[in-house]
Image (spheres, rainbow, N blue to C red):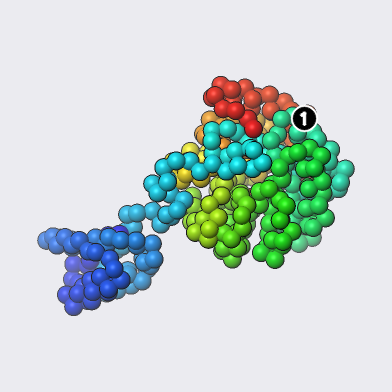
Amino acid sequence: MIILLKREANKEDVRRLREDLMERGFSLHESTGTVESLIGVVGDTSTLDIGTIEARDCVDQVKRIAEPYKSVNRKMHPENTVIDVRGHKFGDGSLQIIAGPCSVETEEQIMSTARAVKEAGATMLRGGAFKPRTSPYAFQGLEADGIKLLLKAREETGLPIVTEIMGVEDLPLFEDIDVIQVGARNMQNFKLLKALGKVKKPILLKRGLANTIEELLMSAEYITAGGNAEVILCERGIRTFETMTRNTLDISAVSLMKQKSHLPVCADPSHATGILSLIEPMSLSLIVAGADALEIEVHCTPTRALSDGSQQLTPTAFTELMVNIRKMAEFLGRKIG
Ligand code: PEP
Ligand code: MN
């Protein structure tokens, strides 16, 4: 961290700042120029609050040099983290395809969708039992019954289950779930993230609607710092001024997160675009960008879906998409599964 001092800084204030930092165990490297005077602070500065230092009379500006995320930083752990979910790996170069409906609605709906995505080549089943809906009057999910239906679908198809948690109090219901998803709206639910740090299960952490990549990495850090190293980051589009797509898919975030962090990266072209005709080109682009997994919404009868009907692929469209996903994976030398 570098502290730029004001030109007119009072010597006594600077002495006190220096003393406070040294008392906290930091070593200081100072440079006094005719125009600018700087203090370089060396040590683990992640606990230092920039605003508090900037509030001192003698300080002009504070700049962080090191990234604030530590355990998820690739600099700390150059090798990819590989997460194994019932033999399907995230982060070892293979590609996982997580497909299924937005919401679990009925037994017949989840079972027929699960069979169809399995048949088409999906490697995991998604489906929301707890649904974060913008309107309190919209379908809120089957909750505990939805979880039971997902487990039934796993029993029949063998597909591991990915499903979203909305509150810490529901954690006991997720005991048999394979991957716990934290949705975009809960990316900064720090209490939930801390609780998931104590869980021995992979967490699929989706980027918030208006969050930076660094904020997503800091949220992942909450989980890893708590003791759970198995976090999969997920790009799902962010809010911009654009209105033609549901969100703006930040494809560069996928490549950048792979560079900045050792954690596997998933991407969700369904919520990112909200447009059926964009799912295939974005899926293929995301694979090229280095995504370890794709999460895609598929519904046996999208026209009757209780949520996100317009962005869910039919089983036929998903089967066609999988043909091209397979071609792209093969071209890049990546195995699906
Ligand atoms: C979902 O995957 O069901 C979902 C609600 O996505 P997001 O949190 O990205 O909006
Ligand atoms: Mn959805």
x, y (%) of residue 112? Answer: 84, 38
x, y (%) of residue 8? Answer: 18, 71
Q: Is residue 282 above or below residue 84?
A: above
Residue lying furthest left: 34
Secondary structure, mark 1, is helix
Residue 311 visible (yes or no): no
x, y (%) of residue 47? Answer: 39, 66
Decide which of 244, 253 is in the foreground and name it.
253
Q: Residue at image x 67%, y 41%?
A: 86
Q: Is mark 1 within 8 Å of ligand 2?
A: no
Residue 34 visible (yes or no): yes
Decide which of 158, 107 is in the foreground and name it.
158
Q: Quadrant of the C terminus?
A: top right
Task: Give the class, few, some or many, for how many residues have Cα within 10 Å of label 1's Cα (few <14, many ≥20).
Answer: few
Decide which of 94, 321 is in the foreground and name it.
94
Residue type for callout 1: Glu
227 with respect to 17 (left or right): right
Q: Residue at image x 59%, y 66%?
A: 191
x, y (%) of residue 21? Answer: 27, 70
Q: Quadrant of the N terminus?
A: bottom left
Please give the residue where the numbered disc 1 appears in the rendered image. 119
Q: Is residue 186 above or below residue 284?
A: below
Q: Residue at image x 36%, y 66%?
A: 48
Q: Residue at image x 40%, y 49%?
A: 76
157 with respect to 288 (left or right): right
Q: Is residue 74 above or below residue 46?
A: above
Q: Is residue 315 above or below residue 307?
A: above
How many marks can you see? Answer: 1
Give the quadrant of residue 210. Answer: bottom right
